[in-house]
Image: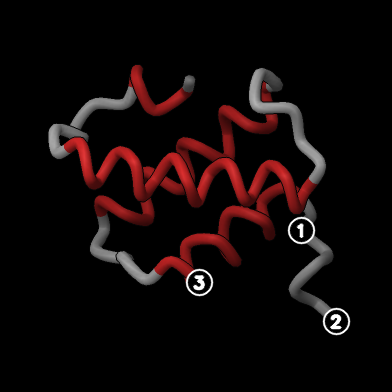
Amino acid sequence: MPFSRMPGITDPDELKFLESVFEEACRVSKVSRDSPEAENMALKLMLLHQSGVDDRGQLLEATIALADPDADQG
């Protein structure tokens, strides 16, 4: 579980929230949770959240875009 190694997450509810966004992003992007790509997605998700983004939709969209950079260029 990538978030168990991330510094700065101390609140169990925060961890559950970020992990649920991560799980959905992996599912939608068809990325294995154990892949290097998933680890990069988890890091981006964490950095966005630490910078103040707490909207689930924004976090999910940005994390999915990392897996598929062309996805937001419709």
Residue 74 is tagged as 2
Which x, y percent locates residue 27? 72, 45
Amino acid bearing label 1: Pro
Split into 4 quadrants, where in the image is the C terminus? bottom right
In the rendered image, which quarter is residue 72 located in? bottom right
Cα distance between the residues tagged 2 and 1: 11 Å
Residue type at mark 3 is: Gly
Could you give the CA–CA distance between mark 3 and mark 2, rounded to whole angstroms?
A: 18 Å
Neighbor class of circle 2 (other Cα within 10 Å; few <14, some 14-19, many 20+) is few
Quarter of the figure with residue 38: top right
Q: Which mark is residue 19?
A: none
Whether residues under marks 3 and 2 lie with C-beta atoms below 8 angstroms apart, the answer is no
Instruction: Point out the tag, 3 or 1, that comes first from the N-terminus.
Output: 3
Q: Is residue 48 above or below residue 41?
A: below
**Label 3 with label 1: CB-CB less than 8 Å:** no
Q: Nearer the viewer, residue 63 or 21?
A: 21
Q: Looking at the image, what colour scheme do you see?
A: secondary structure
Residue at the (53%, 44%) spot, across then down:
22
Q: Is residue 66 left or right of residue 68?
A: left
Disc 2 residue type (three-letter): Gly
Q: Give the spatial CA distance, label 3 vs label 1.
A: 17 Å
Picture residue at 48% right of the left edge, 71% below the top: 58
Query: How many labels were placed on the picture?
Result: 3
Image depth: mark 3 or mark 2 in front: 3
Earlier sequence position, callout 3 versus callout 2: 3
Q: Residue furthest left?
A: 10
Find residue 69 and name its label. Answer: 1
Residue at image point 29% right, 38% down: 15
Which residue is painted at 23% across and 26% down in the image?
7
Q: Which residue is identified by label 3? A: 57
Q: Earlier in the sequence, mark 2 or mark 1?
A: 1
Please provide percent x and percent y for residue 21.
Answer: 50, 51
